[in-house]
Image: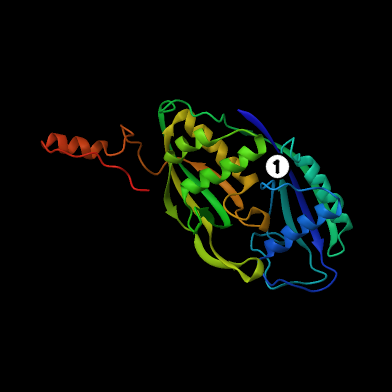
Amino acid sequence: MIETRFYVVDVVFQVPYRVKLVSWSGVFSGKLVYDSLSLAGTMLPEGGLFRVSPVYPAGGGFTPVSGFLAPGEKYRFRAVFWGKAGEAPGHVLARGFITGLSLNRDIVVESMELREEKAAAPSPEPSGEEGGEPVAATIAVRHGPTFYRFHGALVAYPSPWRLVASIARRVSMATGVDYKPLVRVLQQCLELALDNTKKARIRLTHGKEVKVFAGEARYHLVCGKENAESLKQLLQLGQYTGAGGSPGLGLGEIHAVAIEPPRHQLPPVVEPWAEEKNNNQSAGLYLPHREETI
């Protein structure tokens, strides 16, 4: 288990004049972070060391602002930093952002709250081939607008494989530890069970639109007990890191992760094609080896 530190900054602000939002409001909050770090003289290395939320009304709710920002109205957004020592420590980025934001003339800051939060990251090594006695669970995840990248393609549905890989990549950045060995095992533990998300298109920079999904997805978890605990820890970390593409533009938020009793029964043998193989053997049939198509 590895202790991971995140630096969370919640900002409430007003604008001095009407601001037209020609694109997704996360572009506005992302630009505030970049501009503020620049004003503070804090260098931001490449590598995805922070994420932001879109802009929300300060009164509450998770419906991003669209159209325009009105003077006299209060708005909020969140920035989360996880840079690592040797590149740009997260606390340096967070304090640089706060310093620069106080110099930024594009907004009127009502309040800023910085807090350091510690979270446990799993061991990067999987626990054996099976990871202990099999367990099952249902995991409900509430996604903000999200898309995944896959070898040049955009994936606009709650892919469990992309979810695990995306969070693990950011945890690797935060800890300096390679999580690929664990990811290869954990991806096989999760499957999409119920997709209650909705699809939409949002406009990013330079008029580019991307297709996204948002809402609740429920995933089936079947895994060895120790690997299941590692997967649960990774998903909890996703509430800090987010998932998917363009985290610096307010995409990929994970608003909540709930682990519930399984809605399905744990099979006696967790082996692909085991039941089919047994049925055909009992019938005296020969079944050639089958490979799962991904």
Position in image of residue 12 (x %, y %): 79, 57
Q: What colouring method underlies this structural image? A: rainbow
Secondary structure category for the residue under label 1 = loop
Residue 47 seen in the figure: yes
What amino acid type should be assigned to the residue bearing mark 1? Trp
Q: Position of residue 35 (x, y in %)?
A: 80, 58
Residue extending farthest to the left is 284
- Compared with residue 97, is residue 281 higher up or lower down, i.e. above or below? above
Q: Residues within 10 Å of mark 1 (few under 14, many from 20)?
A: many
Residue 292 rendering spot, x and y as whole percentages: 32, 44
Q: Quadrant of residue 178?
A: top right
The residue at the point 64 percent across, 53 percent down is: 247
Q: Going 50% across and 33% down the picture, which residue do you hit? A: 181
Q: Residue furthest right?
A: 103
Counting labels gives: 1
- Examine the rendering and report whether any part of residue 53 can be seen: no
Left or right: 232 in relation to 294: right
Vertical position of residue 112 compared to residue 18: above or below: above
Relative to 278, 262 lies left or right: right
90 on left or right of 138: right
Give the labeled residue for mark 1: 82
Out of 71 and 246, give the one closest to the viewer.
246
| Residue drawn 22% across the image and 40% down it | 276
Relative depth, front residue between 110 and 60:
110
In the rendered view of the protein, which quadrant contains the N terminus? top right
Q: Quadrant of residue 101?
A: bottom right
The vertical placement of 262 against 106, above or below, is: above
Q: Residue at x 75, y 59 (%)?
A: 76
**Image location of residue 260, percent across then percent down:** 48, 42
